[in-house]
Each structure stands twice: as structure tokens, then as C-alpha cells.
Image: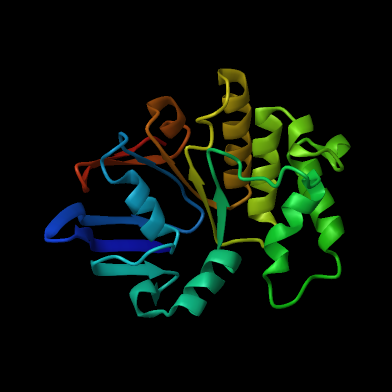
Amino acid sequence: MIEFNDITKSFTSGIVRTDVLKGVTFKVNKGEFAAIMAPSGTGKTTLLNVLGCLMKASSGSFLFEGQDIETLNDDQLSEIRNKKIGFVFQTFNLLERTSARDNILLPLVYSDVYPSDATKRAERLLESVGLKERINYKPSELSGGQQQRVAIARALINDPAVILADEPTGNLDSTSAKEIMAIFKNLHEEGRTIIVVTHDVNIARNAGRIVYLKDGRVEKEEVLK
């Protein structure tokens, strides 16, 4: 489903060039639960931005479902982000004055056609993450773990090809973190493709395979199960 081939990314400020990604190569198969593990400051954020189609690589090829991402224009990239990738962030990124249900519905606002069953779909997703009784609650009325559950449901509303989670348990206590990872495991068992990017080895070991990133390169890969 996802194939990075010798991906590089550099940034230039004046006459100074900083090489962040230095030839990253890895694959993620459809239905796989993979973790990309990297310490802060080693290119993790840049890798996420390229992987999430938020920026293009400087060189190399990135294939998403066989399509060369580097050949697409901004509108085409936006469509992939909206329809093909479900994002889950460390900071939840929920609208504070909006109910859990309406937060989940937000990605559909940018769709070509607003589904007639959108509300029912959002409510089913809330139920699937254990928040059936919290439909009309605002983020301030929910715990951190509950907010992340809403964020996961939001990521699923467009039935994406892949879920990309950036440090999804970084702002949670250990109990909530285990509950969130259990949800990801259940989604994987349902056939979802999941990529979790983290610096926490305990979180990474919930996946079936870990890709270790160090100094802008893939250091090694580890198959867990």
C-alpha cells in the first residue's frame, strides 16, 4: 500500500541546507499494523509530513496504492489526505465548542458529496469506540482518553485506506494509553492498515513490525508477530 524508495528531504535557509531524511526506504502492506519509531529531533516529524502527503520529498519516490505521490498537484494531494488517510494526533485537534458527534463529521464537510447517513455513521463510530453516551459532549467535558477516542472515530469517518497516528498516546496516562492501543489493535483485526509513529518502545510493540529511524535513515526493522 505504501512504499518509500530512497526518500530524502532537505530544507534550505539562506545558504545553509539541512538534510533531514537521508534516503529512507520501507514498505507498509495493506492490512498491516506498523510502527515507525524514532527519537525526537531525528526526522520523525518530517517523515510524518511526507507520509501524510502534507509535503513532498526532495528526491526518491513515494507510492501510495501504486500512485506516485510526487507527480500529484496540491488539489490531488488534498483529496488523498481527505479520502485516503485518517489522521490521529497527539493533541487530539478537536474543536472545543463542538460536540463529539460534530467533531467526527468535520472531514465530511470537505467531501464532494455529504453522505445522507453521515450522522448515523458518526454515531455508530462513537459507539464502536465506547462513547455511545457521549454523543453531545464537548471536548472539555471529556477526559483525555475519551477525546482521543473521538479523534479516532473522526479519522474513520471517510473509511480511509490507512490510519496514520502521530504519538497517539503522548498526552495520556498509562491506563488510557492501553485503552487507545487496544482500539488500534481491534481496528487492525478488522483489516485496517495502521501506522503509528512514536518514540515510545512500549507503544511501538503493539504493532506487528517496527521500523527504526535514526539520523534520517532506517536503522533496522523488527518483526514482532
Q: Residue at x 87, y 42 (%)?
A: 136
Whether 160 is drawn above or below 100: the answer is below
| Quadrant that contains the C terminus | top left
Residues 134 and 224: in front is 134
Q: Is residue 11 above or below residue 75?
A: above
Q: Residue at x 28, y 38 (%)?
A: 41
- Give the side of residue 164 with respect to residue 21, left or right: right
Question: Residue 38 lies in what quarter of the image?
Answer: top left
- Residue at the extreme front of the image, as rendered: 14
- The colour style of the image is rainbow
126 sits to left or right of 207: right
Residue with the most extreme top position:
174
Q: How many marks?
A: 0
Where does the image place residue 131, in percent across and percent down from the top left? 80, 37
Left or right? Give the position of 208 relative to 92. left
Residue 57 or 217: which is nearer the viewer?
A: 57
Which of the pair 105/197 is nearer the observer?
105
The percent coordinates of residue 197 (x first, y second) are 42, 42
Residue situated furthest left in the rendering: 15
Instruction: Name the quarter where the N terminus is drawn.
Output: bottom left
Residue 122, how many percent across, how many down? 79, 53
The residue that appears at 19% across and 42% down in the rendered structure is 215
